[in-house]
Amino acid sequence: MRFRLLPFFFAACAADPMDLVGERARARDFAALTALAEGDDEAVRCKALGVVAWARGGDVVQAHLRAVGNERCGWKPRAESAFRLAEELTGDERRPAVAALAPLLTAQEPELRWNVARALGHLAHPDALPALLACAGDSNKFVAAWCVWSRCRIETPDDSCRKPNMNLTNGKPAP
C-alpha cells in the first residue's frame, strides 16, 4: 500500500512548467525560453514566447530572430519580437533581422504584416526595399501605408516621412 502512493508523491514534487518559464525569465536564459517556446505544451509555449517577445537587450537578439518565425502563438509575440529587433540592432547587424522579417510581409494576418512593415522601417536597412516595394500594393490599406512609410524611411534618412494615419474614427483607414 505504501508504494502505491509513491508515484503521486513524485508527481506532486515535479516542477510546474509555468514556474519554469518564470525561473528561466528571471535568469535571462533565452536559450531555454526559446526551447520552451518551441515545445508541445501550448500554455507554456505561448508564455515563453511572450516573455521572449517583451525582453530587451543584446543577449536576446537570437531568441527574437527565432520568435518571429514561431507561428504557433498568434501574431502578437511575433510582432513584438520584430520591434525588439528594430530597437536593438544597428548597421549590418540588421541584415539577419531583415531576412527573418521580410517574408512575414506576406503572412495571413494583416496585423502582423503592418507591424512587420513598421519594424522594417525602424530597421531602415536597404535589404528590405524589394519586400517593401512588393507590399506597397497590399490589399490592406494599413499594410500598404506602412510599407510606403518604411520605404520612405530607408530612401529618405532625414526623417521627413509622414507616418500613416491609423485613426478609424470615421470607419475608414486613412493612410
Image (tube, rainbow, N blue to C red):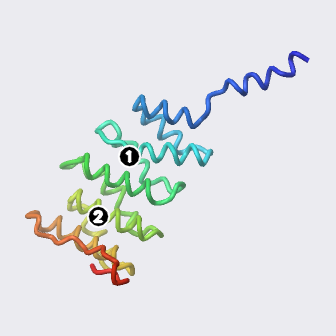
Disc 1 is placed on an element classified as helix
- Quarter of the rendering containing residue 122: bottom left
Mark 2 vs mark 1, CA separation in Å: 17 Å
Callout 2 amino acid: Arg
The residue shown at (60%, 48%) is 42
Q: Label 1 amino acid?
A: Trp
> For numbered disc 2, what is the local secondary structure?
helix
Taking the image as shown, residue 121 lies to the left or right of residue 51, namely: left
Q: Is residue 11 left or right of residue 130?
A: right
Q: Residue furthest top?
A: 2
* Label 1 sits on residue: 54
Q: Quadrant of the C terminus?
A: bottom left
Q: Which residue is mark 2?
A: 118
Q: Quadrant of the N terminus?
A: top right
**Vertical placement of residue 98 versus 55, above or below:** below
Q: Residue at x 39, y 57 (%)?
A: 79
Residue 17 as seen in the image, left or right of residue 143? right
